[in-house]
Amino acid sequence: MLIISAESGAIDPEYLALLREQLGLNVPLYQQYFSWLGGLFHLDLGTSLWTGQPVISEILHRLPYTGSLVILAMFISIITAVPIGVLSAIRQDSWLDYTLRSGIIAGISIPSFWFAMLLLLFVVSVFKYYPPLEYATLFTQPLVSIQQLFMPALTLGIRLAASAARMMRSSMLEVMREDYVRTARAKGLTERVVLYGHALRNAILPVVTIFGMELAFLFGGTVIIETVFNIPGIGLLLINAINMRDIIMVQGIVATLVVIVLVINIMVDVLYAWIDPRIRYR
Amino acid sequence: MSQVEVTQQKVLGGRKSALNRTWTVIWDFAREKPLGAVCGVIFLFTIILAIIGPWITPNDPITTNIPDRLIPPGLTYWFGTDHIGRDILSRVIAGARTAMLIAVTASFIGSTIGGLLGIISGYLGGRVDMIMQRFMDMIMAFPVLILCIAIVAVLGGSITNVIIAITFPMIPFANRVARSIAISVREFTFIEAARAVGASQSRIIFRHVLPNAVAAYLIILTGALGMAILAEASLSFLGLGVPAPHPAWGRDLYDSMRYYYSAPWTAVFPGLAISLAVFSANLFGDALRDKLDPRLKRL
């Protein structure tokens, strides 16, 4: 619109020049990029084109909501994935295994937004239950927050839970064929000690990697979940910014997400070395 | 028996065995992986539906018909109608076309570019490999959906741009697998032999390394399909997919968000379509992977 009115002469050229100066559009592209990159290092992501607020303060204000959601989703998927995977592996090829495996594949295939809609429909129409309206974060009002974020976190975590359970199952099956498991059984340890003391501890390693990898997906998924449940996190902020053509906000959010994912990946690598003493980084 | 007859029999026999071989391969696959085969058939059916869609939709998927809004599924409208009276069955069929066009194209381009770059990078090694892998690391630092969203946000929503947005994050995944294969193939004696007789780099890469990556390529391709369908649905759900009147499963779901408490069918059928397409693509891909190359199970 600005371009059209500028070309038709409806906007004073002097005002346009002033605006270009204000937005920093009068310097070459690479200088714009480097000044943005420089800002990144002292957490200056520029100011929003829409609200005029600094991008970083908007993001910091919204991050706790997304953070609570991701932490809860992570928690839900860990406590479901590990037992499901182990159960499916130790009862291999039973009807329980087949049921759990079908559930796992469904969990990977069903789009989270559809699952969210069906869940809401079910809960609202069968139990007449409505979660509290004003969203709270896990860090200020933990109980209210868990109550509200339980359904969003469940929908968000289901994909992660499914792929982690699948990995848990196949790695558990692999480990149970190892010699040391046979040795453990041969020396007369109870099945419980063999499974949890020997097999599980080794089988859980690749699952940790999956959690690290899928955490990036989890942050991507928050965009959708926050749209469905209308949670004021950075995902919703991103979608609103795109609709408002607020490019500075969009790049600020994307940069923040990338930094978060990178930090998490490093943490997973460290965790990996801590769980498995055979791995050493040089 | 005359000479002619014998030759004829040989020729016929030869032709028959070639056809038989194809069937035997398919039959073996079906018997070993029945679920995977069924899912392959479902996926094939979705693609056929996408191709012949415009000729079999009972109603126009785009024209609105306000008097017939939000009619429950019945004999006239099998899947019911949405909030502006469009036939949901027609929209689901027409949506298959959008989804399949985008998913198949994006997976094909993404795995091909990624695979080729991976083979070149893995075979050449050294500095080329180093630089290319750092680029791939850069792309992989982005969460897939966030990268898709960012690309569409910059380019704007159209079929081509959505395809580009979904293709891009796929490249590093295909790249990594193809690279690891090229690295292991590079050490074989036949490559050394090809180098010894003076074959050029490009000849070695395309005639000797490439054929060894075909199985992996098929696995990457089918594995990418499910992800691509899901990504397309997610983008159009967020309003960033193909532009408005164009039928897309994700957009139909988003539109139904305001009505589905009273009219659940508006949400059930498009969602079912997405789930079934992704489900069949995933299971078929898994079965194909187990059959062709069980070593790739960890992907």
Image (cartoon, rainbow, N blue to C red):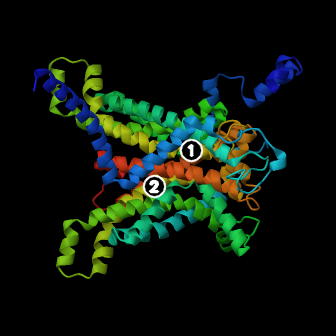
Q: Nearer the viewer, residue B245 or A141?
A: B245
Q: Nearer the viewer, residue A5 or B14?
A: B14
Going by the numbered disc 2, the residue's amino acid type is Gly
Circles 2 and 1 in contact, beta carbons < 8 Å: no
User: Mark 2 highlights which residue?
Assistant: A212
Q: Quadrant of the N terminus of chain A?
A: top right
Give coordinates of residue A94: x percent, y percent.
35, 71
Q: Mark 1 falls on what kind of element?
A: helix
Residue drawn at x 18%, y 22% as measured from the top left: B195
Residue drawn at x 10%, y 23% as measured from the top left: B2
Q: Nearer the viewer, residue B26 or A211?
A: B26
Going by the numbered disc 1, the residue's amino acid type is Ala
Q: Quadrant of residue B74?
A: bottom right
Give coordinates of residue B151: x percent, y percent.
60, 35
- Mark 1: few/some/many CA within 10 Å (<14, 14-19, 20+): many
Q: Quadrant of residue A91?
A: bottom left
Q: Is residue A72 left or right of residue B192?
A: right
- Are the residues flagged by discs 2 and 1 from a single subunit? no
User: Mark 1 highlights which residue?
Assistant: B231
Q: Is residue A130 left or right of residue B198?
A: right
Q: CA distance from mark 2 to mark 1?
A: 20 Å
- Mark 2: few/some/many CA within 10 Å (<14, 14-19, 20+): many
Give coordinates of residue B96: x percent, y percent.
59, 42
Figure check: B200 above or below A183: above
Q: Is residue B121 left or right of residue A259?
A: left
Residue drawn at x 59%, y 61% as measured from the top left: A155
Label 2 chain ID: A
Residue drawn at x 74%, y 50% as measured from the top left: B81
Q: Which mark is residue B189?
A: none
Label 1 chain ID: B
Figure check: A146 above or below A225: below
Give coordinates of residue A240: x percent, y percent.
73, 45
